Amino acid sequence: DAAARGEYRHYMLKEIHEQPRAIADTLENRIGLERVYEQAFGHAATDLFADIEAVQIVACGTSYHAGLIGRYWLEGLASLPCTVEVASEFRYRKPRVAPHTLFVTLSQSGETADTLAALAYARELGFAHTLAICNAPESSLVRGSELVLMTQAGPEIGVASTKAFTTQLVALLLLVAVLGRRHALSPEGETHIVQLLRSLPGQIEQVLGLDAAVQAWVPFFANKQHALFLGRGTQYPVAMEGALKLKEISYIHAEAYPAGELKHGPLALVDSDMPVVAVAPNNELLEKLQSNLQEVRARGGELFVFADAQNAIREDAQTHVITVPPTDDLLAPIVYTVLLQLLAYHVAVSKGADIDQPRNLAKSVTVE
Ligand code: G6P
């Protein structure tokens, strides 16, 4: 066990640090200088993608959060209608399936019972084709899907998913490219995605270098009962993932909210006992997010902001800021997630929690 963890105290920390490599491996042989190779999805990909007009994503847990981010990309870059749902709900609904809809499952293990059941149900419902984005090559999900894109994260041991999530996001960007080129994505747009993806492992290395700054925030969280995570746009699912990481391993109750919804409820809870974490890259929603953060400050809340170097969020008595190197809007969800993983990890370590095997949770939930 100690040998497998190498220099790291826990598998989770090791897996957080493996992300640049896991992402590079997920890209290897899948991208050229300007294009994504669609054979990465299987030999039948070209035929099967030809008539796709919409996407339904289904997953559980952390994989579901990846799907939520994927929707922003599929709609925003490829102009494809996309819906995302947790498998345990999808499998008991009576969805109306639009013609030519691709059914996409996301799963680290490929053995999550609800996701497998949703896939079986999708066949009955008449989806055009099925694609699994998965990290386990011999899994039931892979065997049961027409098309497969393997994330190359390598074995993930920590129950709280880290590198499987970021490689799922990379896989989703590859999907956006191959579907998008048949719809609204221009060749230049695809080249832009490919070039950004190439720069991603290096960018992750850079944010891993912020580890000490993240650790310095631990005392503000360790004795708290609750925490609120805020984001807007693609950063809302990132906030959801950050809250999930914190509750999974530190047992602090954490909730994520799209910052624009604060005024519809959670503002009533804001006080100095509930740290508020915000993910604030430099995007078109930044100004709106800043005014949401002002609402928190005005109510005596304490803010912990991961902010782009170029934006104007200043530190003050109530506002702590970690400055994140500038990144493209497209990569920001992946880059900022790594910081939230580190935050959850260090808070949980300070509480003496069982990081790799949190109480009551399983790595793969193979029963309903
Ligand atoms: C469990 C794990 C999570 C994971 C979820 C979905 O809850 O603890 O880390 O995100 O299952 O698992 P999957 O293997 O389908 O991605």
Image (cartoon, rainbow, N blue to C red):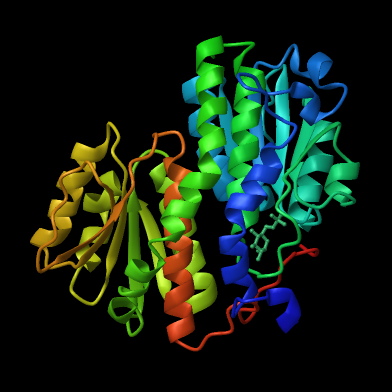
Residue 13 is drawn in which quadrant? bottom right
Q: Quadrant of ligand 1?
A: bottom right
Report whether 150 appears left or right of 327. right
**172 over 316 or under it: above or below:** above
Classify 58 as above or below 102.
Answer: below
Instruction: State the residue at coordinates (76%, 62%).
Output: 368
Closest to the observer, 314 or 257: 314
Q: Quadrant of residue 154?
A: bottom right
Kindly tell me whether residue 63 is visible in this rendering: no
For this rendering, which residue is in front, 93 or 62?
A: 62
Q: Residue at x 59, y 11 (%)?
A: 183
Q: Depth check: give the residue in front, 295 or 14.
A: 14
Give the camera-side residue of 1 and 145.
Answer: 1
Determine the residue positioned at 26% across, 57% down.
Answer: 265
The percent position of residue 130, horizontal first and vertical second, equals 79, 31
Q: Judge left or right: residue 88 versus residue 247.
A: right
Counting from the top left corner in percent of width and height, residue 60 is at 65, 53
Number of numbered discs overlaid on the protein picture: 0
Q: Where is residue 42 in the image (x, y as percent from the top left)?
A: 84, 28
Residue 253 drawn above or below residue 21? below
Residue 349, how many percent across, how many down?
A: 48, 82
Q: Which residue is drawn at 62% across and 59% down?
A: 18
Looking at the image, can residue 107 be seen?
yes
